[in-house]
Image (cartoon, rainbow, N blue to C red):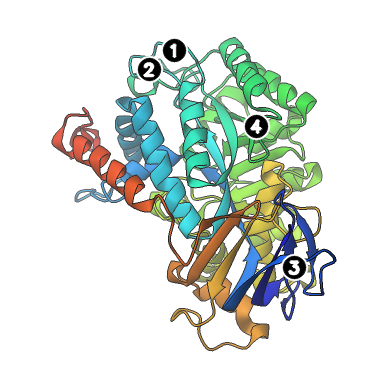
Amino acid sequence: MPTLYLPDLLYTGDAFRSGAGLLVGDDGVILATSSERVAGGAAVVRMAGKALLPGLVNAHSHSFQRLIRGVAEHGGPHGDDFWAWRKMIYQAAAHLEPDDVFNVARMAFLEMALSGITAVGEFHYVHARPDGTPYDDPNLLAKRVIEAAESVGLRICMLRAAYARAGYALPQEAGQQRFYESGDEYLRNTEYLAADLLNASSTVSMGVAPHSIRGLKLDDLTRIAEWAEVRGLPIHLHAAEQTAEIAACEREHGDPPIRLLARSGLLSNRMTLVHAIHTAADEVEAIADAGAVICACPTTERNLGDGIIDARSAIERGILFCFGSDSQANINLFEDARELDYHLRLKRQRRLLLDGIDGEDISSRLFRYATQGGATSLGLSTGSLEAGRPADFFTIDLDDVSIVGVPPRELLPMVVFGLERTAIRDVATEGRMIVQEGRHAQAAEIVCRYRELAGRIESGSIRTDFQAAMPRF
Ligand SMILES: [Zn+2]
């Protein structure tokens, strides 16, 4: 028997409607957005005092990086930079066993679920044992991360990352030995993962993630992109996050990363460029021409001092955005959404720079990026509440202190710019409730396991010397 969810307000893509309902079949697929009588009946779930919205899609996550939230906030008299932070990430990745990878991923995914995220794109690059030798199953760690998403109830797109070198003309780096695979090894192991994953579950999918221009030779990157194109899978890569990375790319190839991708014919509408901050006008044009997506991660970018993307220029050229929690410095996709404009406000000393472009108001645009933008980037059919799509959604308490007191027509701006996690009440993937009334059934156990892991790091029984990774003065 289908289920009819009846909230006070339902967001159907352009506005909140009252008196509408979400009718979901037993298979978790939306049958209709209507509250009319259902032939054959339906189980009715009344959601009084709540609004129901499509689930958020977090297009870029490295779940294990949740481990250094807070720990990385010590600099020294001269401050800190991205590269020092990266050493700490390597420390965090260096000694995790498969169970640890599972437990930290569950922690990050739990937090995502509690913030209204129903799908995650996990850019996964820790493949080998701590000493760099492969596990018997070269996809063991990727599978543990998938298992973590399934146990929390999130939809996951496993973006298996390729990382073959430290960078152009650089020797292999000790902290990266768990990431390395040659181009051939990567393609072979990714083929194994595809054989296990593709068509195995409606909530698990995959894509490829050549880590960055610095992490691969161009011919390997090309082979990986071709492999994904043939199979119709998403391709994600970090690009133009740091100015040092631009300079290194120019030394090796004579062009910055995105111009290189464009002239090599690698930009496509299957590709998502993560960050794309430091770009010239012709590079923005090339992204637009190819129909590639930009994944902005402003809460991470502000934390790492990466820079500010000129989102207005990119949007004016028709580029689609999505958002990612990336380093997990914060897990709050609405914060990423609002920061896309807030950073420009601080830079230009004006407000609402992303409002009204092509006639779309800023709140609708940012919410669309946080839902449909992410779904497009990951090749998912979620992101909007329409018949035939999976019932991935969340509800909010209209009386929550962070949003109470707005008329329905102002609710979306309030949600995008004001909503706090306390307002999120229920979260569902494919019609299956994973959060109910703000609670996740496994939260206590997940937190307990995570506390244990963090304790082992703190006590040194996992040899992670964050202090040694910090910059010396
Ligand atoms: Zn990243």
Q: Which residue is mark 1?
A: 134
Q: Secondary structure at mark 2?
A: loop
Quarter location, residue 464: top left
Evaluate if marks 2 and 1 touch, with contact meaning CB atoms under 8 Å apart: yes
- Mark 4, other Cα within 10 Å: few <14 / some 14–19 / many ≥20: many
Q: Which residue is mark 4?
A: 207
Q: Is mark 1 within 8 Å of ligand 1?
A: no
The answer to whether residue 414 is left or right of residue 438 is right
Q: Secondary structure at mark 4?
A: strand
* Of the image marks 2 and 4, the number of the one nearer the N terminus: 2
Return the residue nearer the eye: 350 or 66. 66
When the figure is inspected, residue 346 is found, relative to residue 183, above or below; the finding is below
**Residue at image coords 75%, 43%:** 286
Q: CA distance from mark 3 to mark 4?
A: 27 Å
- Mark 1, other Cα within 10 Å: few <14 / some 14–19 / many ≥20: some
Q: Which residue is mark 3?
A: 13
Q: CA distance from mark 2 to mark 1?
A: 6 Å
Q: Position of residue 417 (x, y in %)?
A: 53, 73
**Which quadrant of the figure contains the N terminus?**
bottom right
Q: CA distance from mark 2 to mark 3?
A: 45 Å
Evaluate if marks 1 and 3 touch, with contact meaning CB atoms under 8 Å apart: no
Return the residue nearer the eye: 293 or 50. 50
Mark 1 belongs to which amino acid? Pro
Q: Which residue is mark 2?
A: 129
**Residue at image coords 60%, 21%:** 193
When the figure is inspected, residue 432 is found, relative to residue 84, above or below; the finding is below
**Residue at image coords 33%, 52%:** 444
* Of the image marks 3 and 4, the number of the one nearer the N terminus: 3
Q: CA distance from mark 1 to mark 3?
A: 46 Å
Mark 3 belongs to which amino acid? Gly
